[in-house]
Image (cartoon, coloured by chain):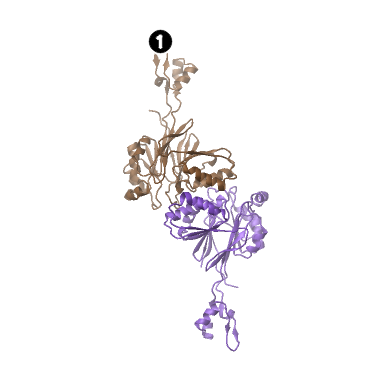
Chain colours: A brown, B purple
Amino acid sequence: MNFKVTILGSSSASPTTNRFQTAHVVNIHERLFLIDCGEGSQIQMMRNNISLARINHIFITHLHGDHIFGLYGLLSTLNLDNRKHEIHIYGFSMLEHILNDFLKYFGSEFRYEIIFHAINVRQHKLIYEDKNITVETIPLKHRVPCCGYLFREKYPELNIRKEMIKRYRLSLAEIARIKEGCDLMYGDGSIIPNKELAYMPYTPRSYAFCSDTEYSKKVINIVKDVDLLYHEATFAHELLKMAKQTGHSTTVQAAEIAKQANVKKLIIGHFSSRYKNLNPLLDEARSVFPETYLAQENDVFDIELEKFK
Amino acid sequence: MNFKVTILGSSSASPTTNRFQTAHVVNIHERLFLIDCGEGSQIQMMRNNISLARINHIFITHLHGDHIFGLYGLLSTLNLDNRKHEIHIYGFSMLEHILNDFLKYFGSEFRYEIIFHAINVRQHKLIYEDKNITVETIPLKHRVPCCGYLFREKYPELNIRKEMIKRYRLSLAEIARIKEGCDLMYGDGSIIPNKELAYMPYTPRSYAFCSDTEYSKKVINIVKDVDLLYHEATFAHELLKMAKQTGHSTTVQAAEIAKQANVKKLIIGHFSSRYKNLNPLLDEARSVFPETYLAQENDVFDIELEKFK
């Protein structure tokens, strides 16, 4: 049961010769979710053997070109690929107008529907749910309305301890209730607690995506204890002032958020094109939060299943 | 004195893992001209060490996404790069509305001006001229209004044969007139013909860009004798019917145009994503016109100077 993140682009505003602009694909139980869609995202998906047809939900953080200019090409290619089923796009309300203008010029032959979901980027709120996951917004602090997204695996169905079926001669109805978390209760008032009868097969996993944002303490509570946090780190810490001015974060600030939120692993990205060598940025972040990694093109971050504690 | 063409993208509607969409950069005497601007053009320019800042003129053939979706990112990056001087964009009139919508959402901080030139794509007409070159439209036959562009070097200034300066004791005024093509005339009515006094340093060069189009005989006369012809060849010749239906050409048709127009060299491109190996397409075109080459990403076609005959 996959929970993995593929990095399509790691550059900030300007791309470079080897860095595309922001886009991540999250694969949770073989459902694919695209977060942001910088120019060239469709090519990057092809290069990573990610089927464009399997993207049904696109989450856009904000309306700067380096996060959305890949939408035009992607949406056009989906139509050329004969897509018939709808696609859902989530983002700040103005994106609906941008999409409508795009469709006006380029969508006359589209055979599939784009369903737009306007997001209140100022609220931390559940915005998507299916049988396996939930997605919540993470209000961010940027020059334009902007939010991140938090993907959480739902609690899985409990597994019955097989030896208990025999020991307590469990009926199918009892097994179903125990799987839902109920204790086993007898007419004489005696109780076998659920924990003795069943167990959680694994710990639900989580991924938080925070780009673009200046250092914001409010983020910490929302991303508390996640398995994997992506936090932008556009600049080295010596450019703290510029980070603040442009609504971005430094390596150290991203690492501070990770540390204070007690996340398991941090990936940093959205690197300014001024940095040819990213290792000094990594070292800087690791000095605060050792479990930091660079988000680089075509990297895959796999959140492995862990036993429930 | 350069006259060279760099291929940024060779794919048709859908990009592939290694083929970007249409865009060529023409360098004539170190002035750079961009023709079409598929998604990822700015990255491809960076990869080819082509300075974005040096592009002042962009020629758009038609308003299908695979020829213009790179404009958004390119125009945005120019602003981030602190561009102050205007850029000229040539294309079908509707492009002005597309650009205005783009500027409405993304151009509020632009510090440079976009000057749009509406093109009548149905007429073969001079649309641009500077001291070194002219650009003419080439009406094409596609599903939407579409034209190609023909770049011609102007006739260079004549070179004086040095030995003639001494022999005829030429004054500066006489030299200037001879360079303009005049004969040397004496009071006694005797004439020294210009050809004896001066020579054309090289033959003016030319490049014609024809994409997207079905086979169109009208193109032949316009691109007659050019040094380098780019003609789309979206399909192998077995898909002739599909080519016709979609407003495109086959390999053989592109080669037929080249042959009948007596061009020196043909490059084919805009390949359908169905073709992984392009060599069969090349072989097919070469069976009709041997001097055919594939337009592939990052290829440079240099039109070398030749003595004037």
- B210 vs B200: above or below: above
- For label 1, the SS is loop
- Does the rendering let one see residue B9? no
The residue depicted at 56 percent of the width and 78 percent of the height is: B198
Which corner quadrant holds the C terminus of chain B? Answer: bottom right
For mark 1, name the chain: A
Task: Classify B223 as above or below A261.
Answer: below
User: Residue furthest toward the bottom?
Assistant: B188
Residue type, label 1: Asp
Residue A110 at x, y percent in the picture: 58, 43
Q: At which x and y percent is residue B245?
A: 66, 49
- Front residue of B74/A15: it is B74
- Give the x, y percent position of residue A139: 39, 39
Question: Which residue is labeled 1 in the image?
Answer: A188
Which residue corresponds to the image point at 57% horizontal and 37% vertical from the top-left?
A: A85
| Front residue (pair A172, A127) | A127
Residue B97 at x, y percent in the picture: 53, 52
Nearest the viewer among A240 and A27 is A240
Q: How many C-alpha atoms fall within 10 Å of the one at disc 1: few (<14), some, or many (≥20)? A: few
Camera sees residue B56: yes
- Locate residue A48 relative to residue A280 in the image: left or right: right
In-image side of A196 versus B307 (left or right): left
